[in-house]
Amino acid sequence: MRDAYQVAKVRAAEAALMALVPDGALMQRAAAGLASVCAELLSSGPGGPGGVYGARVTVLAGTGDNGGDALYAGALLAARGAAVTAIQAGQKIHPGGVAALRTRGGRVVTVAPPRGPDDTRPDIGARYDAGHDARQAIGRADLIIDGMLGIGGSGGLREPYATLAHLAAGERGATTVAVDLPSGIDADTGTVDGPAVRADVTVTFGAIKPGLLIDPGAGHAGVVELVDIGLGPHLEGGPDVSAPQRADIRALLPRPGAESDKYRRGVLGLLAGSDTFTGAALLSTGGAVHGGAGMVRLVTAPAAAAAVRQVWPEVVITELSGDGGDRSEQKNQFPGDVGRVQAWVAGPGMGTTDTAAARLAAVLATSLPVLVDADGLTLLARHKDLLPRAAPTLLTPHAGELGRLLGKDPADVEARRLEHARLAATEFGACVLLKGSTTVVAPPDGLHPVFVNTTGTPWLATAGSGDVLSGLAGALLAQGLLPRQAGIAAAYLHGLAGRLAAAGPEGGGQGGNGEAPIGASDLVRAVQAAFRAVVAEGL
């Protein structure tokens, strides 16, 4: 598990530890860890100088402790023969760090002052010029250390920081290493409210910060390296965000025992598909069958039922009549007449008619766990009185669907994923799995950390992908997992299946140039391989 802690907890832990160690000890530990990672990158990075000696390193130094960490690390690299130049980005610079750098032969340059008010206006681009010295130091660098802003920063970068970040981004031959987190990223949420540094590697100290795991911040962080500076015993209250790893997911996945039968393994009721959207029934059923449910009971329209029978003969189907109802509904017995189930999935391709809304309401009125997706979420946005409910509930929206549920702009949801997932979980009393570049799973109680999935791939952005996920998560719900457990396990397997499908049988899911486009049907076929990869020991 990769656990992340919000700034307030990190600050409190730092204060507790600093009371026990000599002044400056934490900064020296951080600088040593940062310098070690930088040295490794200079020695092994593709196209790099092949070692620290003779390498050209540029430090973007802010005014606070973040700049001090970077300067001290620069001094350690200079002592090993690197040519280190620090750019003083603010009006002041960390005195101890700059003295150490100069003692080891490093040099310090300053940025050019703004020529006038327009130079620093965020709404007018390309006006400010940081000066020849700064441009040259960045342009010639093999490695750039971003030490401008730390975990206390908020909002987008202002000048001269914004221009320095832009110049660093333009140097494709240089590796950019962020100190603790990329400047311009909100440490607690991953929000990026303007210009920000894009790092290849982020070296974070003491504890991972949530903004390094959640997009858009995660996309700016690159590879995250954690340096232990001794904060662990002093971090109180548990993590705020956690990114489960393969072993964590393996521990969650149900395994049949000697006494298992189809009912004990979990029966999933699946309300999906219509005569118009037959594929949604096929794909969600496939995710459910390969998700380990002992039985899948599908409720769907005739055309979708016919399609599913051809592909998934093991599925028990309740076929809706031509008018969208069935006999049990006419007797007000739906969903009881469908048969015994342990959980429901409602939504993929089911339509948004009044009849569909009535079926959704009937499912939500049960005491069983329910996952709501796709059309079901559209209906919920119109009938918000259906939630909260006493039984476990998992909502699986993308940003557009969550925007409709909350009455928010989808772009704002995408930009502030953690904030909106938590808001929806609280408002609807349900666990919320917000799909996207980094999928987040927010529990409704606020007592457990938000889960973040790290296996996603852009190849999952294809029609029907979400239907597979809902079936897979529903199967795990039917097998007894809690909504947050089912959500994160399904997201992990779904992302891994996407990687495996894109890489092909010879790619091993490792990505790279050998990847090819996939469809949702490829995901269904790859789910079993994802399970095998997770449960296999020693991989």
Image: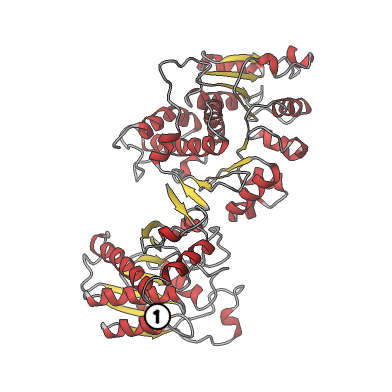
Instruction: Find residue 228 and report its horizontal and vertical position in percent.
Output: 36, 61
Q: Is residue 508 above or below residue 233?
A: above
Residue at 75% of width from left, 39% of height from top? 384
Please give the residue where the numbered disc 1 appears in the rendered image: 87
Classed neighbour count for the residue bearing mark 1: other residues with Cα under 10 Å, few (<14), some (14–19), many (≥20): many
Quarter holding the C terminus is top left
Amino acid type of disc 1? Ile
Q: Is residue 174 above or below residue 503?
A: below
Farthest residue, direction front? 20
| Of 470 and 245, the residue lying toward us | 245
Residue at 56% of width from left, 73% of height from top? 125
Residue 140 visible, this angle: no
Residue at 45% of width from left, 28% of height from top? 254
Residue at 61% of width from left, 20% of height from top? 341
Which corner quadrant of the image does residue 72 belong to? bottom left
Q: Is residue 537 left or right of residue 307?
A: left
Instruction: Find residue 165 and report its horizontal and vertical position in percent.
Output: 46, 70
Q: Is residue 2 above or below residue 32?
A: above
Q: Is residue 46 left or right of residue 451?
A: left
Q: Is residue 331 above or below residue 362?
A: above
**Disc 1, SS:** strand
Instruction: Find residue 461 and report its horizontal and vertical position in percent.
Output: 52, 41
| Of 9 and 295, the residue lying toward us | 9
Which corner quadrant of the image does residue 356 belong to? top right
